[in-house]
Amino acid sequence: MPVARPESQEPRVIAHVDMDCFYVQVEQRRNPALRGQPTAVVQYNDWKGGGLIAVSYEARGFGVKRSMRGDEAKRVCPGINLVQVPVARGKADLNLYRSAGSEVVAILASKGKCERASIDEVYLDLTDAAKEMLLQAPPDSPEEILIEAAKSNILGLPSDASEKEKNVRAWLCRPDADYEDKLLACGAIIVAQLRVRVLEETQFTCSAGIAHNKMLAKLVSGMHKPAQQTVVPSSSVQDFLASIPVKKMKQLGGKLGSSLQDDLGVETIGDLLSFTEEKLQEQYGVNTGTWLWKIARGISGEEVEDRLLPKSHGCGKTFPGPKALKNSASVKGWLDQLCEELSERIQSDLNQNKRIAQTLTLHARASKENERDSTKKFPSKSCPLRYGTGKIQEDAMKLFQSGLHDFLESQNTGWSITSLSVTASKIYDIPSGTSSILRYIKGPSSAASPAIPDSSSVPEDPSLDNNVYGMPIHEEQCEPSISEQEDGKRYSGISAKQCSANEEKRISKKLPEVKGTSSILKFLSRGQSALHEKRKSNELICSHPGPGSSSEANRAEELNVPAQGADRSSTSSGAEPSGSNAWMFNVEDIDPAVVKELPPEIQREIQGWTRPSKQPSTKRRGSTISSYFQPARS
Ligand code: TTP
């Protein structure tokens, strides 16, 4: 459920920058003959000409839409160029687009805190840069304003087209503007400069929104596309929000937005103004009620995170209709390919960024023979991630088998899989200096089994010894334990806390004088305990039942699979797993930035988890609020 964050007392300048028809622009840079032409990028699947995933603005002018397939686009616009997304291992290979996005991010990040929000969009906190401009070189002469800034769209300014540029220049230099607007004007100039640099250095155009918070910046960045920017002065916020349909707002696209429409008759964000904070809290709980009350007033305290890299990596593939997988051999064949790609990506993240992923998760979509309408979902399964393609493949297959066992509920029936994906999450930075010190740590204990990664998997950087990340493991120090969880069920497993403490003690004993050790110990103790656990890959599998699924833990026990906290790892609650299951997958660990890169069916499933939990309801949709949301009431 959305929660209001405390907002800053100081005015901030936040920008949301979104590339225009991004995959098309990347293809146009590869093949300049496509520039200015109606063009679309289509999926690797060529059924009916392939689904369109990106459409150029020229093609949009002919009525081509992303929801179309290639054949339909050709009917609407016979001159359209259809470019197939690059393919590797029988599926879309997005590396080209990912690295093009990184080029842009590198430029945008030069002016302040930068959060990469998806493959082609970022948030920037430009507050400091704007303050500095205001002090050092405030805009004071309309004639000297950069042309790109003068083309800004300022909400609330008279929309007389012939006078627009003149009005914008005057607004950006207004001597009588209040401090907030002056900062915003500086932000608009900085964003215009950045957009010009992006164009010059990458040949890509982008659009942007500039406002006092992330929510408003995001809402307006797409308002004037392509290659334009829009500014939201505080004085225009109320009028602007009065025109925004609730479903357009982030976090209101799902059940909460529907409930606002059906139960409160709210159509636009502005309509929320007619409800008191108490009334909204009464309906939706204290946190969400306050959040709604604030967004109606354009207030949002959400911070721009300092993050240029994704929080997780994922690869998936769908198998629609006759392509559905119906036996373990074909699942294994595809899983091997997905794992190979995932392994390459986490390996390159490790080599380039010195980051290590902790959790491997398998998601699948399945149906049982003769039970096409069953609501039973294939449970997502997680385990600690072991580096090395072979190990990831082996573990992913075990996760699949465990999920299938739960899904089939011991029925001996045929099944088919319509989508598969593997995700690596809980990615941590390795503190600098760790590698050389850990080479020292390795010493004689290196004979102990390194769980992560395997020796074949980290060859590219000799300074990154494989045991750097696969910490020496002393099995005898990590006794399996039986723990009784809140629900009274017993789960066998490793006491990670105990293991971590032992390991830490052992390392500190061994390295009393090594410089920089404390950072390593911090690293070792920071939710990394799972790395030290004695574990065979089939010993720790965590299950993530989809909504409506019954207890996975019971079945995990039958399977002799310790489902530590299985039922508590609710993917919708967002609760952090406790120490002993710190490796577990949590939906919060999935980077929204990469969700868009997964097949649409998987996207929908993940988005479903991030929406408010739904209580099973027999009532007609919309009849009462309580049928939609879990308690969270005051
Ligand atoms: P978007 O930013 O949603 O769209 P866009 O950049 O193509 O166009 P716009 O100018 O309207 O912003 O998505 C960025 C890229 O992500 C897009 O070029 C292709 C890819 N993508 C998919 O592969 N599948 C999807 O469902 C969406 C929405 C995007």
Image (cartoon, helix red, strand yellow):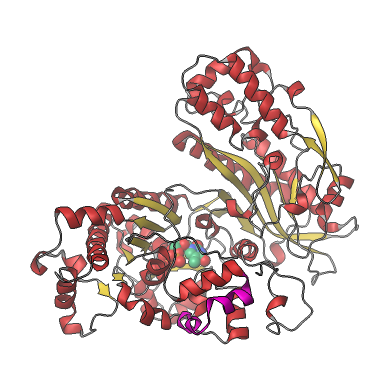
Residue 278 among magenta residues: yes
Q: Is residue 281 magenta?
A: yes
In the image shown, does 243 or 86 lie closer to the viewer? 243
State ligand 1's quadrant: bottom left
Q: Can residue 416 be seen here?
A: yes
Return the residue nearer the eye: 263 or 555: 263
Magenta region, residue range? 268-285
Which secondary structure is most common in the magenta stretch?
helix
Quarter holding residue 473: top right
Identity of the residue furthest to the bottom in this view: 265
Please provide percent x and percent y for residue 619: 77, 82
Q: Is residue 27 above or below residue 555?
A: below
Total labels drawn: 0
When the figure is inspected, residue 387 is found, relative to residue 598, above or below; the finding is: above
Q: Position of residue 252 (x, y in %)?
A: 55, 73
Q: Whole-percent x and y of residue 157? A: 24, 80
Residue drawn 51% across the image and 64% down it: 4
Q: Quick check: 564 left or right of 39? A: right
226 w.r.t. 406: above or below: below
Q: Quadrant of the C terminus?
A: bottom right
Q: Is residue 525 left or right of residue 119?
A: right
The residue shown at (55%, 32%) is 523
Reply above or below: 281 against 593.
Answer: below
Query: Residue shown at 70%/70% (left/top)?
Result: 614
Estimate the x, y position of residue 549 in percent, counting from the top left: 79, 62
Quadrant showing the N terminus: bottom right
Q: Is residue 257 visible?
A: no
Residue lying furthest top in this view? 444
